[in-house]
Image (spheres, grey):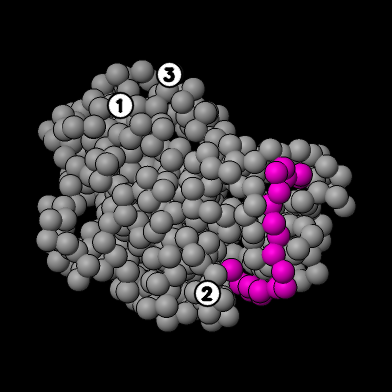
Amino acid sequence: MIGSLFFSSFAIQGQTILPTPFKVEKTAGSFRIGNKLTIACASQQQEESNYLIQRLQNNVRIEKANERKADIHLQVAALPNNLGDEVYQLLVSGKQIKVTANTSTGLFYGIQSLLQLLPKEIQAGKAITLAGYRIPGIKVTDSPKYAWRSFMLDSGRQYQRPEFIKRYLDHMAMLKMNVFHWHLTEGQGWRVEIKKYPKLTVIGSKVAEGKEQQGFYTQEEIKDIVAYARKLHITVVPEIDVPGHSEAALTAYPELSCFGEAPKTVMGFSDVLYCGGREETYTFLKNVLDEVCELFPSPYIHLGGDEAPKGKWNKCPDCQGKIEEEGLKNSHELQMYFSSRLANYMKTKNKKVIFWGDVIYQDDFKLPDNVIVHWWNWRGHKDLALKNAIRNGHQVIANTNYYSYLNFPVSPWSNYFADRTFDMRTVYENNPSDIKEPDSLVLGMGCALWTDWYVYEHMVDRRVFPRIFVLAEQMWSRGERMPFDVFYRVVKEKYPVLREKGIDIGPGMKDEIEADFSWE
Ligand code: ACM
Ligand code: ZN
């Protein structure tokens, strides 16, 4: 509550820090920015310092200085209270602005908070002068609730341009989110260039005929995006969804499906899966993953595993042969065998593997210990995946379809009927993924923007904003929660900044939807 009371008197143009910091104290005086700004940091923090300089370069002359004289001092030094790797302290006094952190990542978050104290135009990168601006005295001590704070974008069903992806990485940095979960393959499109299997993109990126559904990322584009994210302290975790949601790949290489058949449709998921019985599938996927792991240095890789109906596997002689050969009970266990083989292969590359919760609804098959469970299907299975994962000692990411799927609009649209809508208050007060006292195996929280039913690029912002502020708050903020109405007011204080950044803010509540509003 200290934070919100303080902010309501301070925020004139959105100079509130969100997600809410752990501790905020107003201090005496204010720091007046002069005609130039000097910055000091150790050589190891040059990258974070350069980030800040780049964010302010159109607003004030910036020079480097020694630490005692510098206007802004960025330093990595052990903080007295042990609040983890990402803890930072931001101190604004009449003399200096000081950001202290245990790691360069903490420093980066301190810089994000500092930026949020500046005029909205500056936060948005506009070229107005900063000279003469006063930052009120403040002491912030902050660190996140969770180590994993992800945003997922579905680039499989709809392709988005690299510039758009980078724009969202910037939004994530502002929200102190640290994992970009990139859903790169779907029935409707395979989006990552794989040199060994060119048909994946030559054919697989063009299987859907709708607007903005054709396209893929070259390996150079991916490297550029990964490097861009790294500077924002964001890990890019690619998702190659197998054995289902793979109609695009199987249209390109039908010989990898049971019976060698190409899927009849790529719209919606089908039972045309990679054949789990033939060795060719495993060789192909290993080769694909070799290239994917080269592109994405992340210690995690997501291998999907959701919604894989076993109709074909139940009939396929190769799948049934494998079940017999391996002493498995049925096609479900064949998926466990399939998933385990891939997870074990990833272990040889020191990677942890994330699977959607479907792999653990029946938990009598022990999965490898490098498997993390991505809990999503609250609508279908409540907290089954969460419970089974914890019982079996697997880490979990909480990302339930009630209420962290931001493609579910605030009011009905297209095939999202009333039961697949939610507003700000609902996610703030009733999100099952927002666990009060999580088990230590809960690695963190995710949110997702799926692009089914043709969510084009220009429609993404109004679904994501403002509700993502709630999810960011639940991922990051470890202090006592303010009542919803207060929180919503604080979020609204941010709107001028968001508008300045060109974000197309959608409605937060049903009763705010204007008569002429369109989700399209
Ligand atoms: C999912 O929503 N199918 C993970
Ligand atoms: Zn088969």
Q: Residue at x 16, y 56 (%)?
A: 517
Question: In 3D space, how far apart are the residues under numbered discs 3 and 2 (Cα atoms)?
Answer: 59 Å
Q: Mark 1 — residue? A: 215
Residue 243 occupies quadrant: top left
Q: Are marks 2 and 1 in contact (CB under 8 Å)?
A: no
Q: Is residue 437 magenta?
A: no
Q: Which residues are magenta?
A: 21-39
Q: Mark 3 — residue? A: 196
Report whether the residue tagged 1 is closer than 8 Å to ligand 1.
no
Q: Nearer the viewer, mark 2 or mark 1?
A: 2
Q: Secondary structure at mark 3?
A: loop
Which circle's residue, 3 or 1, is located before the other in the chain? 3
Residue in front for this viewpoint, 438 or 9: 9
Residue in front for this viewpoint, 440 or 63: 63
- Give the left or right position of residue 476, taking residue 373 as reference: right
Q: Residue at x 33, y 43 (%)?
A: 154
User: Is 89 placed above or below 52 here?
Assistant: below
Q: Are marks 3 and 2 in contact (CB under 8 Å)?
A: no
Q: Mark 2 — residue? A: 9
Residue 206: percent from left, percent from top? 23, 25
Which circle's residue, 3 or 2, is located before the other in the chain? 2
User: Is 491 placed above or below 251 here?
Assistant: below
User: Looking at the magenta stretch, what is its main secondary structure?
Assistant: strand
Judge whether residue 25 can be spotted in this image.
yes
Judge whether residue 243 can be spotted in this image.
no
- Give the left or right position of residue 71, taking residue 208 as reference: right
